[in-house]
Amino acid sequence: MDVLGIDEITYGADDLASCKRFLLDWGLNLVEETDKSLVFESMNKCRVIVKTTDYPGLPPAIEEGPTLREVVWGVSSDEVVERFAAKLKDLPGYVNAEGRVGCTDPNGLAVRFQKTRKIDLKLDTPGMNTWNEKARRNQPGPIYERATPIEVGHVVFFVKDVKACEKFYAENFGFVASDRYPNRGAFMRCSAEGGHHDLFLLQPPQPRSGLNHVAFTVRDIHEVFGGGMAMARQGWSTQLGPGRHPISSAYFWYFNFPGGGLIEYYADEDYLDAEWEAREFEPGPTVFAEWAIEGGLDGHTRRQKNAKAPDGKFLTEKR
């Protein structure tokens, strides 16, 4: 397994104050700060960086306004970095410095690879009891007052040519297609075995380059809800959620991010291996979401602001 997942992402934006407040509320840890940059880390040390648009050396934007400028993928060894360097040296935007190699993908995005800096984690994640399997015994299900994201799980871009982009990641880095929208979208994972997608490439009806969203993995559906409600309490606007994706089976909650595009909490995606055969879907609302709440849960939801204190009565008690 060469590519292990996303190690780092960098945004170009100018409202650093709003980005800082959002990402702190999101549950990330601020590790560095200057007047022109912010560096956050997730639980496993995956980095989220926000720099001003005039920051020296910031890669060019793929669209106007605040957006994602660079994606750094973590690989398994220095040998993989060296092998990728040899493969990429003749491609546009080639760079090789400070332990990273990279180039520009067909969509104009700066893509980099480094030996992963993320750490392995063993988390207490009580299982879900189903009819057949009772994974949680003598233990209540968790309640999260806020989310603490584990890592950046996937990124999603609008692209001008989905076939060219899919070919680029498959042939150069060994990415594998999980599912597709024929001639419109490609869900790709880093290797044959892994979560449903690390990268989703979506060609809109009027093809263009741009960021759709960045997704953060959390422990379970309870943390998706707890994190989403916490963000709503802080006044951040929901784009859509909570909900569930039929294609990947993941539960989600999307918020509008002042640094560009959307940001998502998600959990419980499908896990695939080499025996999986990519399916084809026609894009549409019911394919994107089996169920979803537009605008999010309202401000009176339990544990949110303006919620009434409990009065000791059962909710089912008749009045």
Image: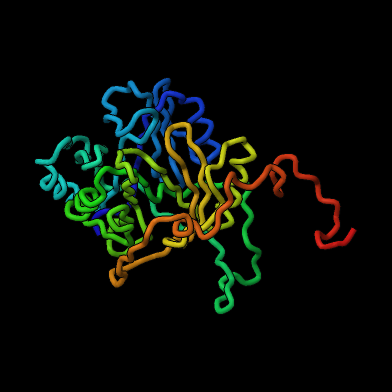
Q: In the rendered view of the protein, which quadrant contains the C terminus?
A: bottom right
Question: On screen, 257 above or below 169?
Answer: above
Q: In the rendered view of the protein, which quadrant contains the N terminus?
A: bottom left
Relative to 283, 296 lies left or right: right
Relative to 195, 115 lies left or right: left
Identity of the residue drawn at 53% across and 49% down: 253
Q: Position of residue 44 (x, y in %)?
A: 42, 48
Relative to 212, 90 lies left or right: left
Identity of the residue drawn at 59% across and 70% down: 136
Identity of the residue drawn at 57% across and 73% down: 130
Question: On screen, 187 above or below 55?
Answer: below
Q: Position of residue 159 (x, y in %)?
A: 29, 43
Question: On screen, 118 above or below 61?
Answer: below
Quarter of the image for residue 278 reads bottom left
Residue at the far front: name it: 205
Quarter of the image for residue 233 reads top right
Q: Nearer the viewer, residue 180 or 117?
A: 180
Q: Is residue 280 visible?
A: yes
Q: Is residue 7 visible?
A: no
Question: On screen, 51 above or below 288?
Answer: above
Q: Position of residue 230 (x, y in %)?
A: 61, 43
Q: Nearer the viewer, residue 66 or 285?
A: 285
Residue at the far right: name it: 319
